[in-house]
Image (cartoon, coloured by chain):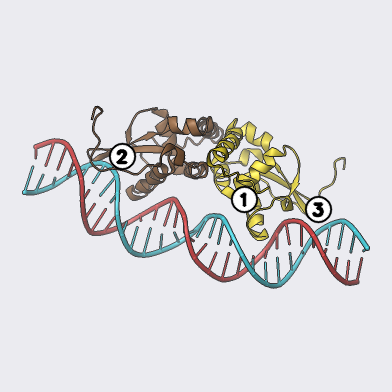
Chain colours: A brown, B yellow, C red, D cyan
Amino acid sequence: MTTAAASSRALAHPERDEIRLESVLHALADPMRLRVVRELAAEEDIELSCSYFVLPVTKSTTTHHFRVLRESGVIRQIYRGTAKMSVLRRADLDALFPGLLDSVLAAAARQEGRLGDDGLGG
Amino acid sequence: MTTAAASSRALAHPERDEIRLESVLHALADPMRLRVVRELAAEEDIELSCSYFVLPVTKSTTTHHFRVLRESGVIRQIYRGTAKMSVLRRADLDALFPGLLDSVLAAAARQEGRLGDDGLGG
DNA sequence: GCCGTACTACGATGCCTATCGTACGAGGGC
DNA sequence: GCCCTCGTACGATAGGCATCGTAGTACGGC
């Protein structure tokens, strides 16, 4: 392989054309997951480990949320050693649903300002 | 009253500033409700009765979905005689979350074309 | 006043899901 | 090899929710 090899453990992802709008909206409708997506969007194209995110839930719940995000096609996950890195699938989402991700991110930012609750624990 | 009077029965709606992004996304994440919203958007600013919508579920389930849409702030409902009319709260949604509704509608239309499933029962 | 239509309220059901705790597996550092 | 860290798997639990059916309410027409 030319790129840095991921661990042998593989993870199932939907192909671009398997991503469903309803699943994406459902994934984004949860506050914990929206928060993760916002943090990932803030670090555009940078792989972040699950442990980077400090969420007010246990590790098993965090694992659950990351799986929902991955299986809905919102993020891509790769094992790197003991860490599991996550990136937003922005290119796929923008191609399928132009403007959707941006308007959701903008809406979340507006609402954060409006309510004075930042939704980002870090 | 100057405008056509609605029935005496009142319905609870969230004020504009009470509308939460997560609730809106949740409301839109259901196929049945997304379908309703798309039909309402297609008849911009026109009040449609619940019975206008031919959904593959019973009337009580339909009532449930309309309530979710209303309580999340996506639609406004008014009684007119025995009928209950619904309209999209486009102005409120556009003011709170600019571009969100349009990108969701566009995404739904794109997905419809992509999958060959129109999501609108006629 | 009576009936039909439009929608609601309520209870039941079965599924999905957000959460937890504990026990386990995979990799890296020593 | 041993242990620590990161994350998973599994089971349990509790609540939410999409669905239904039935019984009931509001309103308009006759």
Decide if residue A63 is on the left or right side of residue A95: left
Among numbered discs 1 and 3, the one appearing first in the sequence = 3
Decide if residue A46 is on the left or right side of residue B113: left
The crowding category of the residue bearing disc 2, from other C-alpha atoms within 10 Å (few below 14, some 14 to 19, many at least 20), is few
Specify the subunit that label 3 lies on: B
Residue identifier under label 2: A51
Residue identifier under label 1: B68
Disc 1 with disc 3 on a shared chain: yes
In which quadrant of the rendered view does residue D28 lie?
bottom right
- Does A15 sit above or below residue D29? above
Dot 1 falls on a residue whose secondary structure is helix
Decide if residue C29 is on the left or right side of residue B40: left
Specify the subunit that label 2 lies on: A
Residue A56 in view of the camera: no
Q: What amino acid type should be assigned to the residue bearing mark 3?
A: Ser
Q: Position of residue A58 (x, y in %)?
A: 35, 49
Decide if residue D24 is on the left or right side of residue A94: right
Q: What amino acid type should be assigned to the residue bearing mark 2?
A: Ser
Q: CA distance from mark 2 to mark 1?
A: 35 Å
Nearer to us in this view, A11 or B81:
A11
Q: Position of residue A67 (x, y in %)?
A: 38, 46
Dot 2 falls on a residue whose secondary structure is helix
Residue identifier under label 3: B8
In which quadrant of the rendered view does residue B90 lie?
top right
Could you tell me if the residues under marks 1 and 3 are in contact, i.e. CB atoms within 8 Å? no
Q: CA distance from mark 1 to mark 3?
A: 22 Å
Q: CA distance from mark 2 to mark 3?
A: 55 Å
